[in-house]
Image (cartoon, rainbow, N blue to C red):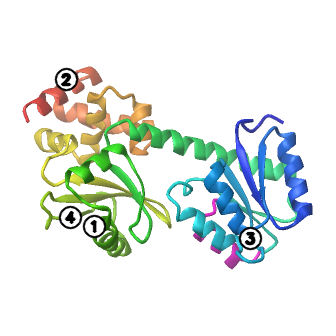
């Protein structure tokens, strides 16, 4: 069966030899590389060393159950994006919800059916690859983006975000003891997209802008330089655009396609095109080339 990428590596965590044997045989027949762990601590050690593409995790195990194992995996910034599918004989709604709350993307009820297992895995591995591609794209686009958990702890950030943190001379201790608690309090207030939290009492002030909640455990934010005005904000002010229209125009000026812009801003290409139509109307142009020229001139004036 070639429905899955033969380069994928899957970690299977289960204390049942029979379950391990069935899943191992199923995945090997599909050409998937299999890692095996018999309990939670061993699974975490293997995951840190091997970085699997997916983890199939038994919910009920001795010593450390699957829920706590998943919670610890998701607390590690290097492992948090690995999709975890729970395997469980526990069908009560509260257990299913618990698995999703600690970071699982799906669950399978035992006894495991091989065809269903492969189908579920295919969907979530494809989603993980898309997420990884989008993250790599963001890393190279100059966006000051970061993700944090409910406690405000930094999970991931683009290189440009780290550059701004260094420019503002914000230490790891400040991030841990001041930044994270303030973010946690703010996130509990359920901020909406474009809501801002400012840190003005700094030598180099910064702010964060809420982008979206990616899950109950992960939030995407944008770090804003409190001294320098962003290209998007300049375009918004100079051309009388909404912030989203300004973001689309800024990426047009940087030579990105609608598809690339949609991936960066996490909206559909069709939505990008609708915003672009509004931009054309507001700045009185007919095509993206002229729109890009207008944007470049507006930014050059700053």
* CA distance for labels 3 and 1: 37 Å
In the rendered image of this protein, does residue 122 appear above or below residue 176? above
Q: Earlier in the sequence, mark 2 or mark 4?
A: 4
Quarter-of-image position of residue 269: top left
Quarter placement of the N terminus: top right
- Mark 1 lies on residue: 174
Q: Residues within 10 Å of mark 4 (few under 14, many from 20)?
A: some
Of 293 and 282, nearer the camera is 293
In the image: residue 80, left or right of residue 14: left
Compared to residue 286, the image places residue 128 above or below, namely below
Q: What range is drawn magenta here? A: 91-105
Left or right: 49, with 134 as reference point: right
Q: Which residue is mark 3?
A: 59
- For the residues marked 4 and 1, what is the alpha-carbon distance in whole angstroms? 15 Å
Q: Residues within 10 Å of mark 3 (few under 14, many from 20)?
A: many
In primary-sequence order, the first of circles 3 and 1 is 3
* C-alpha span from label 2 to label 3: 56 Å
Residue 198 is tagged as: 4
Q: Residue furthest left?
A: 301
**Could you tell me if the residues under marks 3 and 1 are in contact, i.e. CB atoms within 8 Å?**
no
Our reading of the magenta stretch's main secondary structure is helix
Q: Is residue 54 left or right of residue 74?
A: right
Q: Which residue is mark 2?
A: 293
Using the image as rendered, state which of residue 85 and residue 270 is in the foreground.
85
């Amino acid at each position: 069966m070639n429905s899955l990428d033969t380069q994928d590596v899957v970690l299977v965590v289960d204390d049942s030899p029979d379950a391990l044997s069935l899943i191992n045989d199923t995945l090997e027949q599909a050409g998937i590389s299999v890692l095996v762990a018999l309990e939670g601590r061993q699974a975490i050690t293997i995951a840190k060393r091997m970085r699997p593409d997916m983890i199939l995790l038994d919910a009920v195990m001795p010593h450390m159950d699957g829920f706590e194992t998943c919670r610890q995996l998701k607390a590690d910034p290097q492992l948090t994006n690995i999709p975890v599918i729970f395997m469980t004989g526990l069908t009560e709604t509260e257990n299913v919800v618990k698995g999703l709350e600690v970071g699982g993307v799906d669950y399978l009820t035992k006894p495991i059916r091989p065809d269903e297992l492969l189908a579920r895995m295919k969907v979530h591995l494809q989603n993980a690859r898309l997420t990884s591609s989008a993250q790599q794209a963001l890393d190279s686009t100059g966006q000051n983006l970061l993700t944090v958990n409910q406690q405000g702890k930094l999970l991931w950030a683009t290189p440009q975000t780290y550059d701004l943190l260094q420019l503002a001379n914000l230490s790891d201790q400040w991030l841990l003891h001041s930044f994270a608690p303030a973010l946690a309090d703010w996130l509990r207030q359920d901020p909406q997209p474009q809501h801002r939290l400012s840190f003005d009492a700094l030598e180099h002030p910064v702010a964060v802008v809420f982008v979206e909640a990616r899950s109950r455990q992960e939030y995407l934010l944008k770090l804003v330089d409190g001294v320098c005005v962003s290209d998007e904000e300049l375009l918004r002010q100079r051309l009388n655009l909404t912030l989203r229209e300004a973001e689309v125009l800024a990426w047009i000026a940087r030579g990105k396609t609608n598809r690339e812009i949609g991936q960066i801003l996490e909206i559909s290409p069709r939505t990008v095109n609708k915003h672009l139509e509004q931009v054309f109307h507001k700045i009185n142009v007919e095509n993206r080339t002229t729109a890009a020229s207008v944007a470049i001139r507006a930014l050059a004036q700053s």
